[in-house]
Image (cartoon, grey):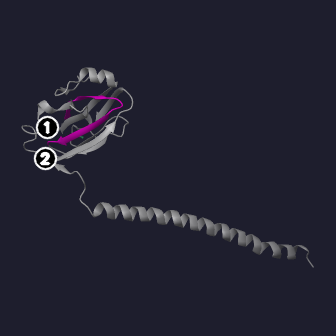
């Protein structure tokens, strides 16, 4: 008889069994990962859908310019008595007010902004400072700039024919230099270059 036949007959089922076991292990691993990801999506989706989004702030777009925190004299960078740094800005077709923003490095900075006309938005350079600005709502977030330097801050929501020319600058100063310029109660900005 053929001496190979028994050997093949012996190993073939064994090889199949190894392959099937390996495939099954991988299928289980992939299945667990998939179930985890779907569970995360479902749970976070239900979690956020079951409650109103937090900290939604509205503002009267008709009076934004003449009363409240977004009047022109209050725009720019403010340092509170507690040392907290807040930047207030307004977006309108097709500029930001103030057009040049000064912030300290290595310090939490809270941005508060709104729009007076269309939907705008901004991103500060390649940092994670990024938001939409929607008429009637106050957008707010807190971020920390780790390195001094200057960033472009373009509008990133298409807002009309001047959209591509709508941008501001953000100067990130070393903390000591910023503190030397900042006065509690005053609003700080810079001259755009
Ligand atoms: Cu403002 Cu695009």
Q: Judge left or right: residue 69 versus residue 182.
A: left
Answer with mark 1 or mark 2, whichever residue precedes in sequence: 2
Q: Judge left or right: residue 58 versus residue 148.
A: left
Estimate the x, y position of residue 113 in percent, counting from the top left. Answer: 21, 40
The magenta-colored residue range is 95-116
Estimate the x, y position of residue 95 in percent, counting from the top left. Answer: 20, 34
Q: Judge left or right: residue 7 versus residue 86.
A: right
- Indicate the secondary structure of the residue bearing disc 2: loop
Q: Is residue 102 magenta?
A: yes
Q: Quadrant of residue 61?
A: top left
Estimate the x, y position of residue 190 in percent, counting from the top left. Answer: 23, 24
Residue at image position (21%, 51%) is 56
- Pick the front one: 174 or 134: 174
Q: CA distance from mark 1 to mark 2?
A: 10 Å
Q: Is residue 107 magenta?
A: yes
Q: Which residue is mark 2?
A: 59
Residue at image position (43%, 64%) is 38
Could you say which disc has been placed on residue 28 in the image? none
Q: Quadrant of residue 65?
A: top left
Q: Quadrant of the N terminus?
A: bottom right
Residue at image position (39%, 29%) is 147
Check whether the beta carbons of the residues at disc 1 and disc 2 lie within 8 A of each other.
yes
- Pick the front one: 100 or 59: 59
- Indicate the secondary structure of the residue bearing disc 1: loop
Q: Is residue 77 above or below residue 37?
A: above
- Residue furthest right in the image: 1
Q: Quadrant of the C terminus?
A: top left
Number of numbered discs visible in the structure rendering: 2
Q: Which residue is mark 1?
A: 70
Callout 2: few (<14), some (14-19), or many (20+) C-alpha neighbours within 10 Å? some
């Amino acid at each position: 008889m053929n001496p190979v036949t028994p050997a093949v007959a012996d190993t073939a089922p064994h090889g199949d069994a190894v392959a099937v076991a390996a495939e099954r292990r991988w299928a289980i691993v992939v299945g667990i990962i998939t179930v985890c990801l779907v569970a995360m999506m479902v749970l976070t989706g239900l979690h956020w859908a079951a409650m109103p989004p937090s900290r939604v702030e509205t503002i009267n777009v008709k009076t934004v310019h003449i009363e409240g925190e977004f009047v022109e004299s209050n725009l720019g960078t403010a340092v509170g008595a507690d040392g907290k740094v807040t930047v207030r800005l307004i977006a309108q077709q097709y500029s930001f007010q103030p057009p040049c923003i000064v912030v300290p490095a290595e310090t939490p900075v809270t941005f508060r902004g709104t729009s007076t006309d269309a939907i705008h938005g901004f991103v500060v350079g390649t940092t994670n400072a990024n938001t939409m600005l929607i008429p009637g709502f106050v957008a707010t977030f807190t971020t920390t700039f780790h390195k001094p330097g200057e960033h472009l801050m373009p509008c990133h929501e298409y807002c009309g024919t001047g959209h591509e020319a709508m941008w501001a600058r953000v100067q990130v100063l070393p903390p000591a230099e910023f503190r030397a310029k900042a006065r509690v109660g005053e609003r700080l900005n810079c001259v755009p270059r």
